[in-house]
């Protein structure tokens, strides 16, 4: 089963991956709209996924576990009230914690349904920058 999913995702290519990302964002937006929530809390964090071999985009960086292993370092954005993984942003293992946060949240912002009137944001201090604050002020 995992091999079939992996093969299918590999065969999508970059254009197909973008279409899948937009489909998943629209699906999550629909669930959010149907929830009836008027305000949400976006929880943002990153994670490290170590890999074996030489996968494209995997890079070495110092982490406390599996030191020296190649890895990916994706961003994750959750809607706390629904325990919903709303959006992900794929990054190489060498990405700094805040790399891509503004671009990722712009995609989230553009996909949120109109019934969401207030957005709260939580993240580790490593994410925060002037550019992020400017974006968060523009949410609603």
Image (cartoon, grey):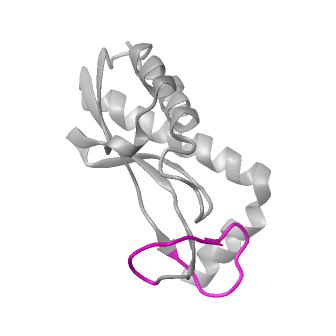
Foreground of the two, 47 or 28: 47
Q: Position of residue 2 (x, y in %)?
A: 55, 81
The correct choice, above or below, for 60 with respect to 112 in the image is: below
In this view of the protein, can residue 78 be seen by the observer? Answer: no
The segment highlighted magenta reads 50-66
The correct choice, above or below, for 41 with respect to 113 in the image is: below
In the rendered view of the protein, which quadrant contains the C terminus?
A: top left
Q: Position of residue 8 (x, y in %)?
A: 68, 70
The correct choice, above or below, for 75 with respect to 64 in the image is: above
Kindly identify the residue that appears in the image at 33 percent across and 20 percent down: 116
Kindly identify the residue that appears in the image at 63 percent across and 49 percent down: 20
> Residue 99 in magenta?
no
For this view, does 131 lie left or right of residue 92?
A: left
In the rendered view of the protein, which quadrant contains the N terminus?
A: bottom right
> Residue 51 in magenta?
yes
Q: Position of residue 18 (x, y in %)?
A: 69, 46
Which secondary structure class fits the magenta region best?
Answer: loop
Which corner quadrant of the image does residue 56 belong to?
bottom right
For this view, does 39 lie left or right of residue 93?
A: left
């Amino acid at each position: 089963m995992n091999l079939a999913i992996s093969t299918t995702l590999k065969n999508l290519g970059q254009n197909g991956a973008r279409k899948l990302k937009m489909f998943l964002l629209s699906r999550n937006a629909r669930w959010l709209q149907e929830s009836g929530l008027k305000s949400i809390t976006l929880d943002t964090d990153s994670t490290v996924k170590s890999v074996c071999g030489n996968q494209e985009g995997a890079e070495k960086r110092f982490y406390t576990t599996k030191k020296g292993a190649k890895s990916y370092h994706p961003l994750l954005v959750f809607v706390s009230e629904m325990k919903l993984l709303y959006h992900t942003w794929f990054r190489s293992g060498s990405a700094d914690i805040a790399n891509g946060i503004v671009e990722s949240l712009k995609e989230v912002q553009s996909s949120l349904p109109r019934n969401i009137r207030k957005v709260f944001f939580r993240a580790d201090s490593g994410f925060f920058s002037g550019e992020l604050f400017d974006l968060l002020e523009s949410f609603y």
